Amino acid sequence: MSKKLILENVSKHFGSLVAVNNVSLEIEPAEFLCFLGPSGCGKTTLLRMITGFEEITSGKILYDGAVINNVIPQKREFGIVFQSYALFPNMTVSQNIAFGLKMRKVPQKRIDERVKEILGLIGLVGWEDHYPSQLSGGQQQRVALGRAIAIKPKILLLDEPLSALDAKIRIRLRTVIKRLQEDLGITLIYVTHDQEEALALADRVVVMRDGEFRQIGSPWEIYKRPKTSFIAGFVGTSNFIAGKKENGRVRFGSRKIAVSGIESIESETVYLAIRPENIDMLLSEDLPEDLIPENIIETHVEVINFLGAVVRITFMLEDEEMLVDISEKEFGRRNLKRRDPIRLYFPPGAFHIYTERFRKLI
């Protein structure tokens, strides 16, 4: 039997509060899985139940075919890296990495060999005699990773491991974590509220809200085919339009727009989402024959946000603020300024259609 980790109808209650509500999932061997969601959605509680640090209210957790609900954390042989690095300040880098091996009474020669191997994997050769206080935050996180993988865990679990680091270090350490997981061939479960991090790292993403799984899929599926308006807003950025069906179109304020697939929706009121990068900015002389005139919007630039390779422009549509993304090159070519007129096209096939109102995070 392959060594899957299986969650069967797992719940966690804290009195009347339901932190995790009846979730089920099969995690494949050597899979990189990410639990993604806002604060308070239950993702860390679920991770703690998997590690054994939190008792399950109901349901089962199975590993390699055996129920491990009552197995203490030390016996599960899972490696864990918490948000706080929890390094021993009085131990050197080498001693921190070796700690779990010493507790398992591994022979010293083998410990020395394993520590040397780990230092190479995490890129800290030459730092073995330094203490945590002499290391940067990124280096400390690498030591925490090294300590977790030194014992050759069956599963590696990371709880918001990069949240305390600055942006550039986070991106570098993402590469370290992804490479380690692939090189070691281990199952890795990663908890984060950072959707960019989840999309960059995971084989599969589990989007959580209110203690429940709202969507499970590849990063591409989660981003391109969000099942709910919450996911469309939480993962990436979306513009939202609330309207009513009318003669095969959607009425939004004084406008009617064509939306692909609207005829299959039974509800009269519909909620649409469209990504900023899926709105086309037209040149003033552009009017290709295949464009639907109703979906061409003439408006003005309200705000310009330079994001590097992308420039995000805020515009108004029926008194609603919306966003369109264009490339930095295109922005430079057009030399756009605030209040400049722009012409936008909303492709009918670029909309996601929902029947539930978008509920913003507080």
Image (cartoon, grey):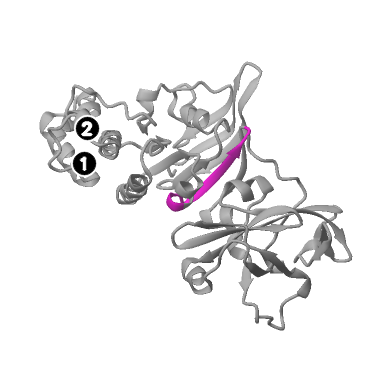
> In the image as oriented, which residue stretches furthest toward the right?
247
> In the image as oriented, which residue stretches furthest toward the bottom?
289
Residue 211 visible (yes or no): yes
Residue 263 visible (yes or no): no
* Residue 263 relative to residue 28: left or right: right
Categorize mark 2 by other alpha carbons within 10 Å: few (<14), some (14-19), many (20+). many
The residue under the point 78% across, 67% down is: 258
Mark 1 residue element? helix
- Report x, y in % for residue 178: 36, 49
Please provide the residue range marked out in magenta.
200-210
Q: Mark 1 points at which residue?
A: 118
The residue under the point 15% across, 38% down is: 127
Which one is earlier in the sequence, the residue at label 1 or at label 2? 2
Instruction: Name the quadrant of the N terminus.
Output: top left
As drawn, the label of residue 97 is 2
Q: Are marks 1 and 2 in contact (CB under 8 Å)?
A: yes
